Amino acid sequence: MELLFRTKPVFYWLFLLFVNVANSQSKPIHKENVRLITLSPHLAELVVSAGALDHLVGVVSYSDFPSEVKKIQQVGDAFKLDYESIVALQADYILSWKGGTPAAIVDKLRSLNIKVIETEISQLSDIAKTIAQIAELTYTQEQAKISTQKFTDKLAELKSLNHPKTTSFIETYHQPLYTVSGKHWISEAVSVCGYENIFKNLNQLSVTVTIESVILKNPQAIINIGKQEDKQWQKWNDLAAVKNKNIMTIDPDIISRPSMRILQGIAQLCQH
């Protein structure tokens, strides 16, 4: 991207920037022409949940659900953007993820006179709040209300089930071992099914841990968030989770993305 930026004539870049600024200042944002770019795959999903798929003009890599999102132009990934493409798309708003989108990217976009709306999800209830926030921008509140009500009702239903408490290690990556603290929405999600995070008291949201520290805490279950099984645990026969054959592997798309699909992941854990 940097090479492309340097090789383009300066007047071309300035022209695109002028068009974007002129449009944002003179064109009122109406229901039928609000244009959005999302800087995280889960935000693209939440735009769809808000009933605003037709307003989505740009996404980042790995934005793949629902299938319609795959057809939308990609503008880079979460850490490296094609600013020229972003300017050319003339988006009214760019949705960033507080804590996920680097501050330098947000500052760069704002320096280009692009309106950046920061979204924040730290707990499950924030998913519904973010859907409603997006709907306020796109005037799709009626569609969004259906989604948020569905999310709230299903989450309440899952929470109402009586699950026994089970100490659990939440494995978000295997080499090195990564986990999350109790402040992370994933920890809250697994707790709905009675799984108690053995590292809930850590200060950081996501952190590396050693196998020895997991063995010392001897969890009754291991929740492996990954596309494939992690077979390294099988050699630790004295570990309670191994003895009980209580090692679960769950697709990260339905448990680590803070979107409505997390309900599917929670339900899968509860069924286990």
Image: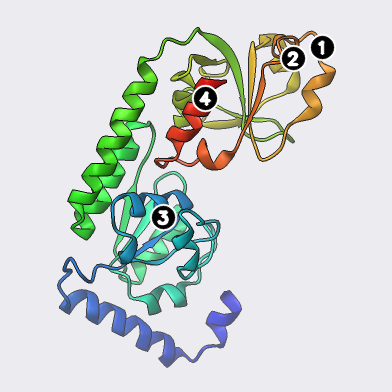
Few, some or many C-alpha atoms within 10 Å of disc 1 (few <14, some 14-19, many ≥20)?
Answer: few
Please name the residue that numbered disc 2 is placed on: 242
Residue 232 horizontal/vertical position (percent): 80, 27
Question: Mark 3 highlights which residue?
Answer: 44
Question: How far is mark 3 from mark 4, CA to CA?
Answer: 26 Å
Instruction: Identify the residue shown where x is 45% and y is 26%.
Output: 189
First along the sequence among labels 2 and 3: 3
Query: Which image quadrant is residue 212 in?
Result: top right
Residue for point 30% across, 39% down? 128
Q: How is the image coloured?
A: rainbow
Q: Nearer the viewer, mark 3 or mark 4?
A: 3
Q: Residues at badges 2 and 1 in contact (C-beta under 8 Å)? A: yes
Q: Identify the disc placed on residue 181.
A: 4
Query: In the drawing, does residue 172 fall left or right of residue 19?
Result: right
Measuring from the top left, give residue 152's x and y in whole percent: 29, 31
Q: Earlier in the sequence, mark 3 or mark 4?
A: 3
